[in-house]
Image (spheres, rainbow, N blue to C red):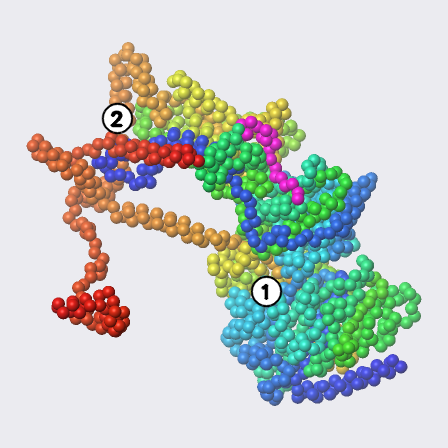
Amino acid sequence: MSRLESCLLMFLALCSVTQSINVEELNEEFTESLLLRPLPDRKVLAHFHFRSSAPPSKTYGRHHHIFPKSIYQLVHKFQVREMELSFTQGRWNYERWGGFDPISSSNAKPPGVELWAEFDVPQDQVDESWKNLTHALSGLFCASINFLEHSTSYSAPQWSFGSASGKLRYGTLPREAVCTENLTPWLKLLPCRDKAGLSLLMDRPSIYRGYYHSQRLHLKSDEFGASEMSTGMVLEQTLTVVLRPDTFSGKALQPSWSLSSLFGRSVSRKCSLSSSSNVYAQFEQNLLFEGDKLKEDREALENAISVGDGFEDNPLFELSLAPKRVIKESGNLQKAGSILYEFSVEDSNEFKPFDLGLNWKVPVAWSCPQAPLQASRFLLGSGNERGAIAISMKSTRSNNVERTSSYDENECWLRVGIFQMVPWYVKVYYHTLKLFLDGEPQSSMENIEKILVSPSEDKVSTGVLEMILRLPCSVNTAALTLEFDKGFLHIDEYPPDANQGFDIPSAVIHFADFVANMSFHDDSLKQVPILSKLQEEVPVVSYTEVLLVPLTTPDFSMPYNVITITCTVFALYFGSLLNALRRRVGEEERLLNGKGARKAGPLTLMISKLSAKLRGKKWEPPKQSESGRSSSKYKLLAKVVLVAGVAAAWQFYFQ
Amino acid sequence: MTEVSAVVKPKPRPIIRIGLFLISHSLFVSIVCCIAGVLALLLLPVLAKNTYISENALMPGSASAMLSTDDASDGHVFVNKIMSISSMSINSGIEIPEMIAKHIIESGGEVNYHKFQPLSDSFHPLQFFVGPDAGMVQDNYSSTSYGVNTVGIVRAPRGDGKEAIIIVTPYNSVKPTTSEALSLGVAYSVFTLLSRVSWLAKDIIWLAADSRHGEHAAVAAWLRDYYTLSSGDLEHEVTSVKRDGVSNGFRRAGTMAAALVIKVADSSTGFEKDGLKIYAEASNGQMPNLDLINIVNYLAVHGQGLQVRVEKIWSLLDSWWLYSLGELQELIGKVAKSLNPGWKFGIPASDYVEGCTTLASSLYNQALGIPTGPHGAFRDYQVDAITLEFSPRFSSSQRVLFLLHVGRLVEGVIRSVNNLLEKFHQSFFLYLMTSPSRFVSVGTYMIAFALLIAPLPLVAAALFSDASKSKSPGESIPTSPAWNWLYTAKTVLIVHLWGAIVTIIPYFLRQFPDSSPLISLLTWIASSAVLLFFTRAASSSLPFSCASQLQTSEWTLLKAVTVAAAFIGLCLMSVINYATAEIGALLLVPMCLMAVPLRIDATAKTAKTVARGACNVLLVFVGFPPAAFLLSKGALSSFDGVRLDDFWNWIESLREWNSATYIYICMVHLPCWVLLALAVVAAKGVALFSNIQTREQMEAQVHVASQKAESHINDVNALITGMERLGLELFGDEGLEVPSLDKGKRIENVFGDPIPDAINVRPPDTVHTKGSGSRKVSRKEAVIRQMHKPLRRCKKCRELVRHDSRNCGKEKEKNKSK
């Protein structure tokens, strides 16, 4: 019976989908969805996904009902072909939350702001468009994205991101603090803002209290393409948060949660402008595998979880609402893939709000699928002079890694792409690139398939290293080191709080041979945006940590002291130099003689002159009596001492 | 002298005049400066300022402590668990790390073990200049005994992971004592709290350091691996990848902001309060930022009511002379206050004595250059760190309360450091503590040092000018005195080179491991002496090789150059380690000033010269490094326990800790001492040490010489000619040569034209600036100017006119009269 029901449901859904396709050709569309997934370390991942699309303006015109006008203007003014902007707070924990699923590959972002954009303009206008775009986005999102305008803060990756057109620019601001003032303009782009629909859940304190918060905006348009098969503009807005449920539940048992306990709110109605508004609960295959084992232990006869039934008697957990649909991933041959339960918020209202809950029945531990190599990056060396950047990659040996490359063990290669952007004041010596495989130093050229280095230019451009490593599949650890010298900045180039140190943006590690996607049997599911997004083949990408390099920083209160002391030294130097240049020795002696004569007083001078004349000798200036002068000095000193003594005695006497 | 010639010759520049004046009065100036320097040093406790928190971002104590009694009792349970493990009979040293790791994982942190072996002895005396290199560390674990550090990390929930705060608890993993277990308990309770809180901005690393091979070695090994590509990064243990979630891979957490080493003392305080002792001195006298000590002191005193102390030399505490000095300054302070209530100096005598003992300890610890705890390892990587040693009031009861207090203090300090956006940079790095809340900054204590070494260049200059003036009569070939000093400088350089060789000798002596300290010391001294002898043989220019023929001028020059070398050495050392330079200056400066050959004193047997000779001998004895060390050791404790091999152990420890003090002693102090001491003891000078010797004495000696030569007329003639020459040389040119005359002649030589007596073209006497005189305005112009001005209303005639009420009628009269 239930099977029949589901078939009917499916049919209905198909009908609606085909209808929507017809509509889409003419109209704008907006969908919203939320994906929830329990994480192994007692946390919950919530992934909001909003998608607005508009048909090409050639056919549709310029007036939109749903698609945000500001984004439309942005696309048209700067001719943006593709753009991604993300604001992130916290770090994605690759070890615990996984790194091999579509959500982590496309939504785990480095802390701060990351922006990349590809333009549809001639090559020489790309930089200008980028600069204008950063300013526009800075105004739009109340963030200091305009700092990416300067050529020392962005780079032009050749093949690490998107297409290799050379019209792509990439920049990050690791120090940008993310706050509600960035979220509000982002919400403004939604047709219902946060007044209705799933965005009602975005209670600011609860979503910013989480362990990871990443708000992302992805824009794609082919407005300017020559082809007729234009699909218009697609704006994807996602918000990924990792929250810890507050509910207390023993030490072993995973915490149970509901939407209202996670967010402090619940959804009362859907956004009436959205064409679909669904909530999905995802359970990973490792978790289900544990469930299966449990079930086998209980000697259940049939397979634990199958489409449509077996929902209530799941041994692990219990969902508070009945799912509208259960979607099963078509996994490998050996194992079942993960499972998605779909719920719709459409039939909720003020009195019966949609509040999905999850209750765990038994303690369970599982692990998330990992990327083939787990990368971490750190600094070597200390001091203000030099150091080294090291990227270490360790094999995770995850069993569920499916290799698309050759299976031959001898000819099995793991291709790892590394993109590293380094600011100019960290002067990397690229010739010092060293590669260690399993602790053994390698001649690096053997393992490098492709490398592109553009060294930094002081105060002009950043240094970029793009490379693809070819590692044997059996590798356990691989480490890469690059030595650098620390540069000096001009005093006005220091940012505020310069004593904190300087950031080296995250390196991007991507595994080109691995794709993180889910595949579903049902092709019709492609029509639901979030599911089609999950099915999209994206390479596995992970970001490393941001590094903090302590550079030599001047004492900023010092310039005043330095100026005064320098001025004093210069004054002394120039004074004495001018004095030495100006002096004429003969002249001075003559003047001095004259002065000596004059000092003697007119009367004595006259007498001495007269006597000299009388005696018939040559007149000589009289010698100054030394005793008189010194005695007067002593008198003065004695007077001063006397006065001081009298004053002290006076003071002491009258106390 | 200059004033006499001032009438006929132009005065030299004032700076030069001051310099000449100081040089001519160098004896007086040096005595005054030296006494002032010592006085300034003794006055430092009075001049100390109260500490204050300089960085506003720290905000200590502004948040209430979150550590609850539950956390403290958790910590207590943890302590009991450790004690139960340690009381087990079989303990391989891995149980406790495993237990700690299990607890860390339970509280939500990340763990890894760090295996290490203590480093073998390697001497890098200049490591504080270059820092450890960034390359790889090649280490091979051949031996069986290695330590296991347990490292737990809490990641800040919303932080960016760029910075980290370190908590270090050293403990012996084989047999931990109760106090070590208590310190682990403190760290554990704080760590579990921090893994829950939401305010963290920096990651927290808890390093439970295995102190089996020494506390410092464990921490230093971990830091070395943190800053290099260590084996933990490169090797991947496939066999036991994850044992209970603990990986062997090295985990890191960004740049270190600060480190706290937590220790608990074995003995209870005996006071009413729990005690806290702060150790801050790192290698080579480096100190952590004063703000770090300030927060700890502020929170401990105002927050938790602990009794905070810093180290002091206890034996000085009841010395009568210090107390009487304190009373003297108190009295002076009182008198000054009665004169003017605004003058507030002078502190109570007991405070003064306390300050002095603390200051002495601070100075000594900085001068040693040996870190006073595991925090010293952090300073080598420019991380501010201090050791907090708590001493509980009672031995075992009320442990939970103790854990609560101490845990809250540590939490408060971590919270303050967590508030910090930048690294510590606001407050002082160069200071001496006189009490936990008082300090002497670099600006103050440098005065004492500057006063102490100021006489050295003066004395050197004075001696040099004396030497260049007085040429001995026996000198057959007159050499240019200006270049004489170069030969002497060569001598001094050779002795300093000898010092460098002496520095290296202990390294070779270490190759014979089974020699007792005393034998090693004696070998060292003997080999140094032999080397000195060989150096003497190799270079004939050394003065003591022909000591009997040493001329006065040579001796004076030698002393001048030695004093200059000592000055340079002390100045250099003061940049590297102030405290060493200060103590070195106290020993070296009096010797430099006093040193006169004993022979000179012996020839004139007045009371003054005898006293000076005795002083010289005493100073030479005290200046010898082993003697100075043993004397100070004896003075501080008692002379019974003083043995010669203590010095060897002391020197060995200096060398092992890469202390710059060792280099100073061997390469600056020892050569200067050797030069001065040999000069004092061995030099035979003729009585012509003109600066100190009076003219009467000289005349008396001339008389003695003439009496000796009376019998032969030839000798008399020779003596007379000699005396004539001597007189010409000494007094021939009246006074100093004034360089400006030479300059004039030199200029004449250069131009080839004599300077004319009268110069017709002279600079104008007066200068008129442009537009200084005003032009008389014609009547027309005045009228035109008046026309442009607006009319004003006169209050008398109520009309718009050009006059005011005061000269209302007069204007018309004036016009009429015209």
**Residue at left offset 46%, top offset 36%:** B338
Which residue is disc 2 drawn over? B728
Disc 1 to disc 2: CB gap under 8 Å: no
Instruction: Answer whether residue A92 is magenta in the image.
Output: no
Q: Amino acid at mark 2?
A: Leu
Question: Can residue B373 be seen here?
Answer: no
Q: Position of residue B203 (x, y in %)?
A: 66, 55
Q: Which mark is residue B5?
A: none
Q: Which residue is mark 1?
A: A176
Badge 1 amino acid: Glu
Q: On what subunit does the disc labeled 1 rest?
A: A
Nearer the observer, B775 or A543 = B775
Q: Is residue B249 above or below residue A199?
A: above
| Protein chain holding label 2 | B
Q: Is residue A561 above or below residue B599?
A: below
Residue at the spot 71% in from the left edge and 75% down from the top edge: A198
In the image, is residue A602 above or below residue B791? above
How far across and how far down the image is residue B270, in percent?
Answer: 70, 35
Specify start and end residues of the magenta stretch as a single range: B305-323
State the residue in front, A454 or A177. A177
